[in-house]
Amino acid sequence: MNRASVDTFEKISGQLLSIYEEISLLSKKNPNDAVNKFKLKFVNKLLSQSNDYLDKMYKPFDDFDNFDEDDIPQNSDVVFILSQYLQCFEKLRSDNVVIKHGAWFWRVIGEETDNVDEDGMVLIRTVKPKKLKD
């Protein structure tokens, strides 16, 4: 990973979490209601960006890319898929972070001279990975 990929990770995973939380609230009230086309457009755009970023190694499902806009999904369907993507983002995070001196850091390839570990990898502070579900 490099600094740009960490920045992309933070942006996409943050947006995924935000949409997940919003749709989860709707799903708790009305799980079988259809997601409106306006929201679905943004969900699909974010899923497309996620698929490109996660690539085959971390993408949750080989045969799923996004929702069909002609077959509008239910709130609960969107929550289910977004939770899988969030889980995969956390797996990617846990595979690329280390704990040093009680803090969590991304290990990235870079040219900065501060926060370099013994292997010459640049350390960028991050949050502790969420517990992955088995």
Image (spheres, rainbow, N blue to C red):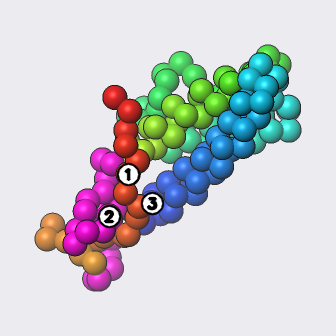
Could you say which quadrant of the image residue 69 lies in? top right
Residue 121, visible in the rendered structure: no
Tell me if residue 23 comes above or below residue 100 in the rendering: above
First in sequence, mark 3 or 1: give its number: 3
Disc 2 to disc 1: CB gap under 8 Å: yes
Measuring from the top left, give residue 85's x and y in whole percent.
52, 36
Label number found at residue 96? none
Residue under pointer 3: 6
In the image, 102: left or right of 131? left
Residue closer to the observer: 60 or 48:
60
User: Image point 72% across, 30% down: which residue?
Assistant: 27
Label 1 residue SS: loop
Region of the chain picked out in magenta, as a range: 94-114
Counting from the top left corner in percent of width and height, residue 106 is at: 34, 62
Residue 26 in the figure: left or right of residue 47 = right
- Residue 97 belongs to magenta span: yes
The local secondary structure at tag 2 comes to strand
Q: Which mark is residue 104?
A: 2
The residue located at (50%, 54%) in the rendering is: 9
In the rendered structure, are the residues bearing label 3 and label 1 in contact, judged by CB atoms less than 8 Å apart? no
Question: Amino acid type of disc 1?
Answer: Pro
- Coordinates of residue 34 in the picture (x, y in percent): 82, 23
- Of all residues, the one furthest to the left in this rendering is 118
How crowded is the residue under tag 3: few (<14 C-alpha within 10 Å), some, or many (20+)? some
User: Which residue in the protein does label 1 denote?
Assistant: 129
Looking at the figure, which quarter contains the N terminus?
Answer: bottom left
Residue 62 is a magenta residue: no
- The Cα atoms of the two marked residues, 3 and 2, are separated by 14 Å
